Image (cartoon, rainbow, N blue to C red):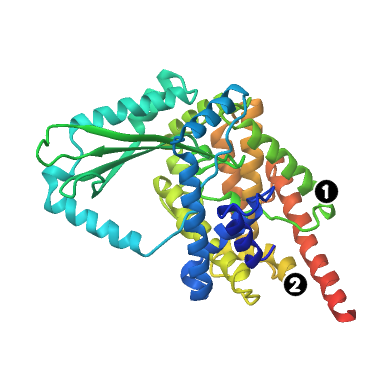
Amino acid sequence: MNIERALETVREFTEQKSAPKDLQPSLDLLSAYTSALPRIDSSLARRVVETARTYNERVRQEELEPASVSGILRELFSKLSGKKRVRRHEIYIPTFSDKILSVLQSVQRNSDADFGAPKQVELDLFKTKALTLLVDAGITLVEALSLIKTGSISYSLTEGAYLLQDNMLHLRMHTSRLPGCEYEIQGSFQRDSFHPELALPVTFELISHIAPTGFPAPSQYIGMPLSDILFPHLLRPKMCPKFALFLEQKRALAKDLLPTGSLFTKAQAHIVRKKAQLEKLRPLIQKLPLPCELEKAEEYIKEHIEAPIHRMQDEWLLKQNSTLTADSPYTSLYLLQLSEHLNVEPHTLSPFERALFTSLFRQQLIFSHELQHGDLDPKELLEQDIALFNGTPPQDPFTQEAQELVEELLQYYPVRYETGALKQRFS
């Protein structure tokens, strides 16, 4: 599907001219384009934003309570019949105005700190409502209390909806049950400048982001910062039977790590143990070639692995740029994957890049093993990691299996390039 067709499909839906059976492919493509708005043609960017905003407004309207009698009855009969309304997600539209708004809000908070900062009564009401929302979502009271205690709260001020001199206070809490299982609680309070002692709650909402990948976060594996985004997505997976089986097992693990999955509770206990081990293992961990401090591993992944790869994806998908170049070991691994998409000769990995690639698979294999069969000796695992990056021949089964998977892939990419080049030569 191209962007023109995607725009037309979404426009038809928002104008109710037709009801496409599956909007998702169009929404996916539109989302991909909005991630690169500053870098695409201004005319196309305007159309993308216009269509996305119209669609988002339609989604918001659908979420409103039915205002008419017929709407109320329709909603009632729908509930009685057991049918669930399809809830659609809005398309995120990044804009430069976000930065301006952030600056204005910080100035407002600094200049009017007494009125701008959340009052204790507002924080207490917000946390109480957050607790209710989490429990309603099926989380036990004990765990919900723990999530609220560890959650981070941010706030912002906007112009009020009812009186021009009033403001709206928006509170947001981010908390996580497990990596890949995140919750955001949003709440708004109307501010009355004539009665500042009042706390007037307006809206509260719980937004869940549940997308476990089956790959360990740094906190689940000695703090080493690697990302699921580095795993290949082969066009011909049947040519790599070991890797195809590995991916099948990884997907099954991701399913078991959902809040309703068989390994979710185990994973919660597992991450607690891993975090408790980190301090004792720190001297040994420092022998690994880690690019950042353990405490900054999550931030490093976003900034130095995922963000550069997303930029490469934009260059490839949006600009049709086939002359991409790697600027780090991580983008080098991703460029290797793109060789079969772009039909370019895959470059040879350096010893360090190869060890990094092997470590990616090794982490996954160990994570899966520990969740299903119990924890391994963390000291031994670390010594094996150090040996891998020092070029020592592997003695443990996890490194050996990881190297077999890497070897299969490193044989796959040249074959894909040669067959692709031959097709072009004789076509």
Label 1 to label 2: alpha-carbon separation: 22 Å
Residue type, label 1? Pro
Q: Is residue 308 visible?
A: no
Circle nearer the viewer, 1 or 2: 2
Give the position of the C terminus as an image quadrant.
bottom right
Residue 338 vs 69, above or below: the answer is below
Residue 363 point in image, percent of width and height: 61, 43
Mark 1 is surrounded, within 10 Å at the Cα level, by few (under 14), some (14 to 19) or many (20 or more) other residues, namely few
Residue 153 vs 158, above or below: the answer is above
Residue 114 point in image, percent of width and height: 11, 43
Question: What residue sits right under mark 1 in the picture?
Answer: 241
Residue 143 point in image, percent of width and height: 43, 23
Q: Quick one: label 1 or label 2, which is nearer the N terminus?
A: 1
Label number found at residue 343 = 2
Residue type, label 2? Asn
Q: Residue furthest top?
A: 141
Give the position of the N terminus as an image quadrant.
bottom right
Q: Secondary structure at mark 1?
A: helix
Front-most of 292 and 425?
A: 425
Instruction: Name which residue lies at 54% across and 70% down.
Output: 327
Q: Residue furthest right?
A: 426
